[in-house]
Amino acid sequence: MRKPISLVLLVSLFFGCTSEIKPKLIIDKTTKKQNDFAIIIHGGAGTILKKNMTKEKEEAYKEKLAEAIKVGHSILKKGGTSQEAVLKTIQVMEDSPLFNAGKGAVFTNAGTNELDASFMDGKTLNAGAVAGVKDVKSPIELAIKVMTDSEHVMLSGDGASLFAKEQGLEIVAASYFYTEQRFKALQKVKNSQKIKSKVLINKLLFTMRQSRILNLERWAV
């Protein structure tokens, strides 16, 4: 009777082992190959107070960010270069008044829109940048051109604008970058500065008067 029992136990162990292996084989066969790339964007480092963010405005930001990242992701998925993906992704945000880039750029104290952009190739460490650009529709495109088509790393102001024209990039009027929201933000800051200046001047005048009174009292004594 011992031999049949041993045989039954052996068969049970055999099937027990094979039943443990099968799930592993199934998992390996059904595992999908993931993308060997990733893309991350952010909409800027500015501060937007919760009280000033409506649900509609929040959705508008999310939708535009989603649109931008999908453009870049699609390029990478089809085998495009990271340079092209970055360019097209950022151009979506440059064309939107929601972001402080291109169409939605903030105003300087002088009431002008001056834009900056930079790009670096992580593989070669080559880089290109522009600053103080006033009439180039896509500063990021110009920054990449500085990297790929010039001996410079950075161009600014009129020099950057001249180079953009030589490269055939799209040039726009200064009014293209104007948005009512950004202009009102500038006026708010300027009005705030005026109030602060008046308060400071009043404090200074008060201090001077007090000092004069104190000196007159000393002379009287």
Image (spheres, rainbow, N blue to C red):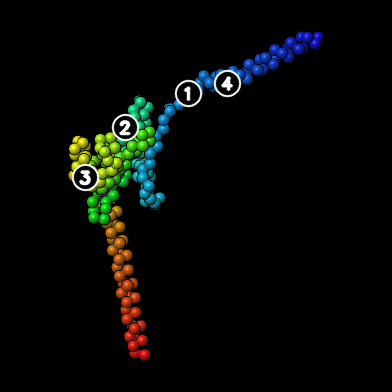
- Kind of element beneath mark 3: helix
Residue bearing mark 1: 32
- Check disc 4 and report its element: helix, strand or loop: helix
Cα separation between marks 2 and 1: 27 Å
Give whichever of discs 2 and 4 has the lower sequence position.
Answer: 4
Residue kind at label 4, given as amino acid type:
Lys
- What is the x, y in percent for residue 114? 25, 48
Q: CA distance from mark 3 to mark 1?
A: 51 Å
Vertical side of 25 occupied by 178: above or below: below
Report which residue position mark 4 lands on. 24
* Residue placed under numbered mark 3 in the picture: 159
Structural distance between the alpha carbons of marks 2 and 4: 40 Å
Visible residue check, residue 114 = yes
Q: Which residue is mark 2?
A: 84
Residue sitting at x 80%, y 11%: 2
Using the image, determine if residue 165 lies above or below residue 29. below
Q: Where is residue 65 drawn, in percent x and y?
A: 36, 38
Answer whether labels 2 and 3 touch (C-beta < 8 Å).
Answer: no
- Label 3 crowd (10 A; few <14 / some 14-19 / many >=20): few
Q: Residue at x 32, y 72 (%)?
A: 204
Task: Give the image quarter of residue 4.
Answer: top right
Tag on residue 180? none
Q: Nearer the viewer, residue 206 or 144?
A: 144
Q: Amino acid at mark 2?
A: Glu
Quarter containing the C terminus: bottom left
